[in-house]
Image: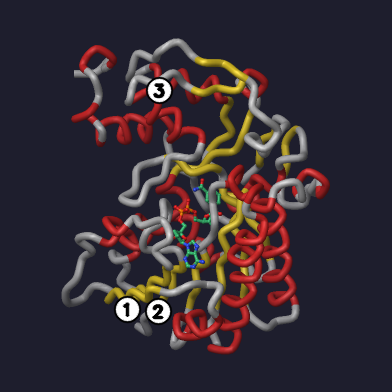
């Protein structure tokens, strides 16, 4: 069997990548997992205790930046598949960082795509987000028209859309085989977990007995979410089954904030909720919407994630710091 050489950008340290590189180490059809990350998040522990030995893929770590064309070229050299995850990801904060977001999320993606084409990479999978549908209402799928006025208000979503278009252009021009994963907001434990996003933030606030910062207008709005394990399985599935030039929504379920909070409440007593309204720059998706994942399901992908199990697992990892009085479990 010819084994693959895989590059994961933003892979070693990120919320998704830090678990993905561990799961991919179990693959028999992979010989190399190369990681490109600029360590901007300082999550060095994400690289602790990676498996090594005979008959398992070898790791290589490149401390480098997707803004640097030479780093991109070096990272793509000899690679079969690129999983491009490196990005500035704290969407509300990108409002004050338009230049940096442009340089990393858009220009950095272009440099990665160009380097992958130069190096003869066979497949380029790009991480995108269902937040690109944020200005749309109701049920959306990959053919739904995006509300570009809303998309362009936030550098994170604006640059995601432009990065998608760049890869789709390269794929349609047959320069490279490229696919887009529009992922829902991730929940679920990983070694490089971050807590800016909804489920994880509320879980952390509950664990530390802080009032949950819930926006009154958003409590019954629906949003797409994605279990981390489903995300990793979907990347692998689309590496094999995805069609070049296509966009895929990757969504375990569409939940309201109320559903998320009620799920946390099954495991912990919550302090009075602090219901307030955000400033316009704090909330990026103003409308209620849910994203359909029928397209990837029709290819044969099955979502197995479970919101309650993932929240319970995250809570258990913090067991040592949870005050006894707020635990509903033994
Ligand atoms: N986590 C989510 O809820 C979610 C949802 C949808 C889409 N996504 C997308 O998936 C990807 C990964 O998300 P995540 O949550 O794992 O992100 P993360 O913020 O946890 O990790 C991003 C990684 O990229 C690295 N990075 C940042 N700038 C870089 C640069 N200039 N050069 C090299 N490395 C750089 C960081 O050091 C970090 O390790 C992102 O593209 C994100 O937009 C994430």
The tag earlier along the polypeptide, 3 or 1, is: 1
In the image, which is nearer the foreground, mark 3 or mark 1?
3
Q: Nearer the viewer, mark 2 or mark 3?
A: 3
Indicate yes or no: mark 1 CB to ligand 1 under 8 Å.
no
Residue 145 visible in image = no
Residue 108 falls in image quadrant: bottom right
Between 40 and 114, the one lying in front of the other is 40
Circles 2 and 1, Cβ within 8 Å, touching? The answer is: yes
On the question of residue 114 being in view, the answer is yes
Q: Answer with mark 2 or mark 3, whichever residue precedes in sequence.
A: 2
Dot 3 crowding, Cα within 10 Å, few <14, some 14–19, many 20+: many
Q: Is mark 3 within 8 Å of ligand 1?
A: no
What label sits on residue 4 in the rendered view? 2
In the structure shown, which secondary structural element does the residue marked by tag 2 occupy?
Answer: strand
Are circles 2 and 3 on residues that touch, CB within 8 Å? no
- Residue 326: image x %, image y %? 28, 15
Look at mark 1 in the image and give the residue it sits on.
31
- Label 3 and label 1: CA atoms lie apart by 40 Å
Foreground of the two, 158 or 184: 158
Residue 32 in percent (x, y) is at 34, 77
**Percent position (x, y) of residue 272?**
45, 10
308 sits left or right of 226 in the view: left
Mark 3 — residue?
264
Which residue is at a point 28% across and 64% down the rendered structure image?
26
């Amino acid at each position: 069997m010819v084994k693959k050489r895989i590059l994961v950008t933003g892979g070693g340290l990120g919320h998704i990548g830090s678990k993905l590189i561990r799961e991919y180490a179990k693959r028999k059809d992979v010989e190399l997992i190369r990681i490109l990350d600029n360590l901007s998040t300082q999550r060095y522990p994400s690289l602790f205790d990676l498996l090594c030995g005979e008959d398992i893929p070898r790791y290589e770590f490149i401390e480098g930046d997707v803004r640097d064309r030479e780093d991109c070229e070096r990272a793509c050299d000899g690679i079969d598949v690129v999983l491009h995850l490196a990005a500035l990801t704290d969407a509300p904060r990108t409002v004050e960082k338009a230049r940096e977001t442009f340089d990393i999320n858009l220009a950095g993606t272009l440099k990665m795509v160009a380097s992958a084409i130069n190096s003869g990479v066979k497949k380029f999978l790009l991480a995108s987000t269902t937040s690109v549908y944020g200005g749309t209402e109701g049920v959306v799928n990959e053919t739904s028209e995006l509300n570009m006025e809303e998309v362009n208000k936030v550098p994170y979503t604006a640059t995601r859309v432009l990065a998608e278009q760049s890869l789709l252009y390269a794929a349609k021009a047959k320069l490279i085989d490229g696919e887009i994963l529009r992922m829902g907001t991730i929940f679920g434990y990983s070694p490089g977990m971050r807590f800016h996003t909804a489920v994880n933030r509320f879980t952390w606030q509950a664990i530390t007995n802080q009032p949950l910062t819930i926006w009154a207008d958003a409590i019954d709005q629906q949003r797409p979410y994605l279990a981390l394990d489903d995300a990793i399985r979907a990347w692998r599935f689309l590496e094999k089954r995805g069609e070049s030039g296509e966009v895929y929504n990757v969504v375990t379920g569409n939940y309201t904030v109320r559903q998320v909070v009620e799920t946390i409440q099954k495991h912990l007593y919550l302090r009075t909720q602090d219901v307030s309204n955000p400033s316009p720059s704090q909330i990026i998706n103003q409308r209620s919407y849910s994203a359909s994942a029928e397209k990837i399901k029709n290819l044969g992908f099955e979502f197995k994630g479970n919101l309650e199990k993932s929240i319970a697992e995250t809570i258990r990892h913090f067991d040592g710091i949870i005050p006894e009085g707020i635990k509903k479990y033994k």
